[in-house]
Every structure is written in C-alpha cells, then in structure tokens.
Amino acid sequence: MNPLYQQMSQPNDIISRFRQFRQTFKGNPQEQVQQLLNSGRITQAQYNAAVQQAQALQKMLGMR
C-alpha cells in the first residue's frame, strides 16, 4: 500500500504535519527534488515516486 494512503488514515495528523512543513519550507519543491536527483542523492525511481505522491496529494487537496 502507498505510504501516503496509509498516513491518510490519520487525516488530522497529516494535515498538521503538512501545515508545519509548508510554514518552514523555502524555495520551489520541484526544483529541490530535481536537485536531489541531479546530485545523485536520490534515484530516478525515488524521484518518480515523489512526483506520483505529490500529484496524488494535489488531487486529494483539490489543487488540480
């Protein structure tokens, strides 16, 4: 099962954690993840998984 969906069973917790993350994150998330890929700190498979999770989260939050 997708870890994102597992966490969604606790919606208040994930929303609280997302809000905290959003308040502290600086910069463009897509650029940050792309830099991790370019530097070799994450694999292409990890990058693809992050993109899929971000898209799923955007859909659930009505952002797309």
Image: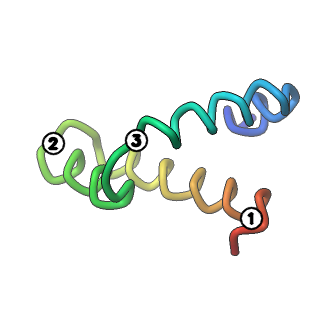
Residue 57 place in picture, x, y as percent: 68, 54
- Furthest toward the front, the residue is 23
Query: In which image quadrant can residue 8 be found?
Result: top right
In this view, the mark in front (1 or 2): 1
Residue 24 place in picture, x, y as percent: 43, 35
Colouring convention used in this rendered image of the protein: rainbow
Decide if residue 35 is on the left or right side of residue 46.
left
Looking at numbered disc 3 in the image, what kind of residue is underneath it? Phe
Instruction: Say which of 62 and 42 sits in front.
Output: 62
Decide if residue 45 is on the left or right side of residue 13.
left
| Contact flag, marks 2 and 3 (Cβ < 8 Å) | no
Q: What's the CA distance linking mark 2 and mark 3?
A: 22 Å
Residue 17 place in picture, x, y as percent: 64, 28
Q: What's the CA distance linking mark 3 and mark 1?
A: 21 Å
Residue 28 place in picture, x, y as percent: 34, 59
Looking at numbered disc 2 in the image, what kind of residue is underneath it? Gly
Decide if residue 48 is on the left or right side of residue 54.
left
**Other residues around mark 1 within 10 Å, as few (<14) / some (14–19) / many (≥20):** few
Point 28% across, 51% down: residue: 32
Point 57% across, 55% down: residue: 54
- Furthest toward the left, the residue is 39
Task: Indicate which disc residue 40 carries.
Answer: 2
Q: What's the CA distance linking mark 1 and mark 2?
A: 29 Å
Nearer-N-terminus badge (1/2) = 2
Instruction: Say which of 36 and 19 sits in front.
Output: 19
Nearer-N-terminus badge (2/3) = 3
Quarter of the image that includes the C terminus: bottom right
In this view, the mark in front (2 or 3): 3
| Contact flag, marks 3 and 1 (Cβ < 8 Å) | no
Q: Pointer 3: what residue?
A: 25
Task: Indicate which disc residue 59 carries.
Answer: 1
